[in-house]
Amino acid sequence: MAFIEVMGYSGKRVALERNGEIVPRSTFDTAQLNDGDKLEIVVAVGGG
Amino acid sequence: MNDKLIIAGKSYSSRLLVGTGKYKDFTETRTALDASGAEIVTVAIRRVNLGQNANEPNLLDTVPPSQFTYLPNTAGCYTADDAVRTLRLARELLDGHSLVKLEVLGDPQSLYPNVIETIAAARTLVADGFQVMVYTSDDPIIATQLEDIGCVAIMPLASLIGSGMGILNPWNLQLIMDRVSVPVIVDAGVGTASDAAIAMELGCDGVLMNTAIAGAQNPVLMASAMKQAVEAGRSAFLAGRMPKKLYSASPSSPTAGIIASTRN
């Protein structure tokens, strides 16, 4: 499944780590996810 | 007077750096930020809420990275690995922006930095091309080690994060400033305007704060107070203060021509 389908909204600025590796934002349109992948999907929020 | 703050070769007019956390909403965040005059803002990196409406307001709309210099932090990280992963995600999120704030905490009650993990993370991050502004204790030996590793700014605490206790150890801050040649920016523990002014009077290059502004009853007014305090403290430092003397043996008025006293 393409990552961008999972996200549902391609306009949101997120960063993605798959199985410990950064997935470049420039590849989001085509990046494929596999069963069992461990993902971290992050955004910038307010903080000190 | 050209007195810019220079960090990693880039110059800034404001010596006040502010966090974006703990505000009531994004509008208050932006209004306080504008009142502070800060150019550098810290942000945290957190998991996206997948169930969230895509049209919900987000920080980057209110505080655009094109107008402000973002400093992604590693708040909530207790290991070097977590801090490194967080900043790699942040760099990708911000299109290669590599100026970051490193903080690795030791325990959740005090939020005191774990300087051993901090040093380990700094080594990895500097080797990976990051420009690291590092939050640390006020230990001058650790500060020089972090500079030697290649950090672009040293950010010692004044007191515990969010405590508002002000500067607890100005002597250690002085030791750090004497030994470190990159900018020294006090980060954590500032509570009110005089704390910021004192930091600048000591000779610090800048002050970073979040709770002092966001936790004030009137954050926008406090932001403005902090802007003035940092400027006043910096001018006082540059002006070169008078010496402190236990007994003032030098009145400001002439000693000649005093009228005769009628006392017996």
Image (cartoon, coloured by chain):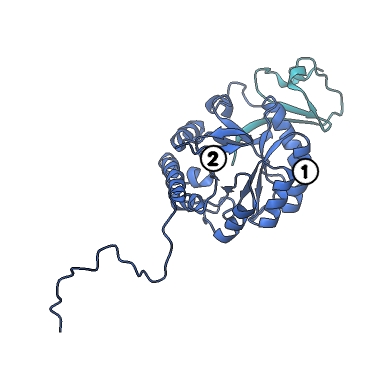
Chain colours: A cyan, B blue
Instruction: Give how far across and how far down residue B59 sits, in percent.
Output: 57, 29
Instruction: Give how far across and how far down residue B109 sits, in percent.
Output: 65, 55
The outermost residue toward the top is: A29
Q: Which mark is residue B123?
A: 1
Please give the count of numbered marks on the rendered protein.
2
Q: Mark 2 falls within which chain? A: B
- Name the residue: 83% across, 19% down: A32
Q: Mark 1 falls within which chain? A: B
The outermost residue toward the left is: B262
- Name the residue: 53% across, 56% down: B167
Left or right of residue B241: residue B6: right
Q: Which residue is mark 2?
A: B17
Name the residue nearer the viewer: B12 or A48.
Answer: B12
The kind of residue on which mark 2 rests is Leu
Q: Label 2: state its secondary structure.
A: strand
* Quadrant of the image occupied by residue B101: top right
The kind of residue on which mark 1 rests is Arg
Other-residue count near label 1 (Cα within 10 Å), few / some / many at <14 / 14–19 / ≥20: some
Instruction: Give how far across and how far down residue B22 sits, in percent.
Output: 54, 41
The outermost residue toward the front is: B256
Left or right of residue A27: residue B261: left
The answer to whether dots 2 and 1 both sit on one chain is yes
Q: Label 1: state its secondary structure.
A: helix
The outermost residue toward the right is: A35
Question: Looking at the image, is mark 2 or mark 1 earlier in the sequence?
Answer: 2
